[in-house]
Amino acid sequence: MRSAVFGLGSLRGPWRVTVAEESMSPALKPGDWLLLDPIVRRWPRRGSTVVVREPGSDLLVVKRVAAGPGDTVFAGGQRVRLVREAWLLGDDESCSVDSRQYGPVPREALVARVWLRYWPLRRAGLVRRPNPPRRLVSSGPDEEAATDS
């Protein structure tokens, strides 16, 4: 499943979207409304939540930045050095279609950065990852990284 979003607002100012699927659960659930910042010139820092055009389709999806330019990702037993791409993951690994399937995502696919969830009111606030992220990246050539189980 993907965390598809619907309802992009006008092209100016913050955008509003609705989360349609569960791949970012429990941080984001279907029916959550988000405010987005469409003016992003580079990948936000690790841990940020973004909306991108899914590679190979025109579908807008919500994912979390697990690694950005300059990081090395360990995937499929290989080291992948990210140059202008990012490695994006859904919070619910059991149902997320993300960089583990389609690889690094180019900067051109970045649509917006998620500012906050504003609906439903009982869940309003910043979108934070509920669990500490798995260590998938190294920040430099000398730093070794391992995936935690």
Image (spheres, rainbow, N blue to C red):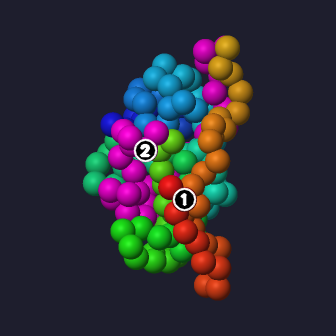
Q: Which residues are magenta?
A: 92-121
- The residue located at (55%, 48%) in the rendering is 64
Dot 1 corresponds to which residue? 148
101 in magenta = yes
- Residue 73: which numbered mark, if any? none
Across and down, in percent, residue 38 comes to: 59, 44
Q: Is residue 88 above or below residue 22?
A: below
Task: Identify which residue, 99 or 119, lies in the foreground.
Answer: 99
Across and down, in percent, residue 24 comes to: 49, 36
Q: Residue furthest bottom?
A: 142
Q: Quadrant of the N terminus?
A: top left
Q: Residue furthest front?
A: 149
107 in magenta = yes
Residue type, mark 1 in image: Asp
Q: Residues within 10 Å of mark 2 (few under 14, many from 20)?
A: some
Dot 2 corresponds to which residue? 93
Q: Is residue 35 left or right of residue 2?
A: right
Is any atom of residue 70 visible in this view? Answer: no
- The residue located at (50%, 32%) in the rendering is 25
Residue type, mark 2 in image: Glu
